[in-house]
Every structure is written in structure tokens, then in C-alpha cells.
Image (tube, grey):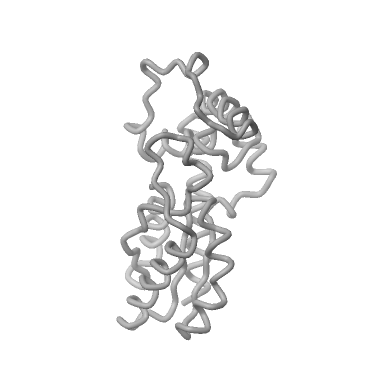
């Protein structure tokens, strides 16, 4: 949802030269399967679906494609295939996660925790508070007493830390981060035209 939000706002800056397509709703999330309800695609399947979407766009005359990612699990599989996409499709295709827009200085300035992106931590919660506050609801949440079913000890520890960091989030810091990402993505789009 965050990557689409940033992409749409960036595209509006360059309208009508830029369009935003339907996002891929499921990515490579094997590392989160301990979290009940997680859906995942195998890296090779995700890569093939992404390729087919890009090929569909190419066949309709689109020669510049900027893929804006919002899930870290997708990055490795796409980077492994990106040169192959370019070679097979014969078009200008780039891939970036929108949080690449952030310098360490900006993160330190805007995020009290100093963490970005951080799964459901301060940054993602701040972003949500600014962009879609209806998705943030702390009522009835007692995460400290929750029994985690995360098998990876390191992930279980960071998950609890991220929860505490999430409570540091503000809509104001989220909006500041959104504004930077939108401008950065718009610049990436503009450079491809």
C-alpha cells in the first residue's frame, strides 16, 4: 500500500506522461511465514509474474518501466533477474524500493528510533498514520503479553523491538518521509522519460 501511495503521488507530478499500474499484491515473504496469515510466492514465481506484467506493458508500447517496491523480500529476487528482463524485453526497466530515498541523516532527524524501514516499526507506522490512519488501531493491543510463534529467535526479538518503536510514530514524521519519497520517485520517473 505504501509503494502504491508514493507512486501515485509521484505520477501525479508528471501527469500525463506517467501511469501507475495495478500492483502485485503478494510478494516473496517466506521469511515471514511464522506470522499467521502471511501469503508468499516463490522467488521464481514472483519473478515470472513481474516479467509477464512488464512484457504486457511493453506489448502495449510502454518502453520505460520503473518498478517501485514496498517489500524488502522482493528486492533480492528482482535484482537477480533485472538484467535478464532488460535483455529479453529490450526496454528501459528499473527497480527501486521507495525507502532508498532516505539518507541516514533524514532517518535520524525524523525517526526517534533511528530505524528505517523496519517491519511494522516506527517508520511504517508513521507512514500509515500520515497516509491511511484508518489502518492504525492500538485499541486492545497488548503485544507485550502476546505469545509469539516466531521460530527464528532473532526475528522474534526484533519483532518485539519493532512493536515498541511503532509507538514512537507520528503522522508528522510520516508525512515528512512521504514527501521525500514522492519527490525522489518523481525524479527517478522523470529521468527515464
Q: In the image shown, does 30 or 1 lie closer to the viewer?
A: 30
Q: Position of residue 78 (x, y in %)?
A: 53, 64
**Left or right placement of residue 92 versus residue 158 in this view:** left
Q: Position of residue 165 (x, y in %)?
A: 57, 27
**Left or right placement of residue 171 versus residue 80 in this view:** left
Tag count: 0
Q: In the image shown, does 147 or 121 lie closer to the viewer?
A: 147
Which of the 4 quarters of the picture holds residue 111? top right
Find the residue positioned furthest to the right: 105
* For residue 68, above or below residue 152: below
**Left or right placement of residue 142 versus residue 117 in this view:** left
* For residue 130, above or below residue 52: above
**Left or right placement of residue 162 versus residue 67 in this view:** right
**Which residue is drawn at the image coordinates 56% and 23% (left, top)?**
164
Q: In the image shown, does 100 or 105 lie closer to the viewer?
A: 100
**Which residue is drawn at the image coordinates 48% and 70% (left, top)?**
190
Q: Position of residue 101 (x, y in %)?
A: 58, 54
* For residue 57, above or below residue 9: below
* For residue 142, above or below residue 38: above
Q: Position of residue 28 (x, y in %)?
A: 47, 53
**Which residue is drawn at the image coordinates 37% and 58% (left, top)?**
24
Q: In the image shown, does 188 or 92 lie closer to the viewer?
A: 92
Which of the 4 quarters of the picture holds residue 62? bottom left
Amino acid at each position: 500500500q505504501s509503494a502504491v501511495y508514493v507512486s501515485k503521488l509521484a505520477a501525479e507530478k508528471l501527469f500525463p506522461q506517467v501511469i501507475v499500474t495495478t500492483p502485485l499484491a503478494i510478494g516473496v515473504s517466506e521469511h515471514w511465514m511464522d506470522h499467521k496469515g502471511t501469503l508468499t510466492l516463490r522467488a521464481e514465481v514472483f519473478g515470472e509474474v513481474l516479467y509477464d506484467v512488464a512484457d504486457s506493458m511493453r506489448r502495449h508500447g510502454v518502453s520505460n518501466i520503473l518498478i517501485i517496491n514496498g517489500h524488502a523480500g522482493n528486492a533480492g529476487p528482482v535484482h537477480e533477474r533485472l538484467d535478464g528482463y532488460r535483455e529479453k524485453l529490450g526496454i528501459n526497466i528499473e527497480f527501486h524500493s521507495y525507502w532508498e530515498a532516505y539518507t541516514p541523516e533524514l532517518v535520524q532527524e525524523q525517526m526517534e528510533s533511528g530505524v528505517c524501514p523496519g517491519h511494522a516499526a516506527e517508520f511504517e507506522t508513521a507512514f500509515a498514520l500520515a497516509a491511511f490512519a484508518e489502518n492504525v488501531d492500538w485499541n486492545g493491543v497488548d503485544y507485550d503479553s502476546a505469545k509469539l510463534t516466531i521460530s527464528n529467535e532473532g526475528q522474534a526479538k526484533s519483532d518485539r523491538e519493532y512493536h515498541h518503536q511503532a509507538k514512537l510514530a507520528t503522522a508528522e514524521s510520516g508525512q515528512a518521509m512521504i514527501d521525500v519519497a514522492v519527490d525522489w520517485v518523481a525524479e527517478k520517473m522523470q529521468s527515464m522519460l
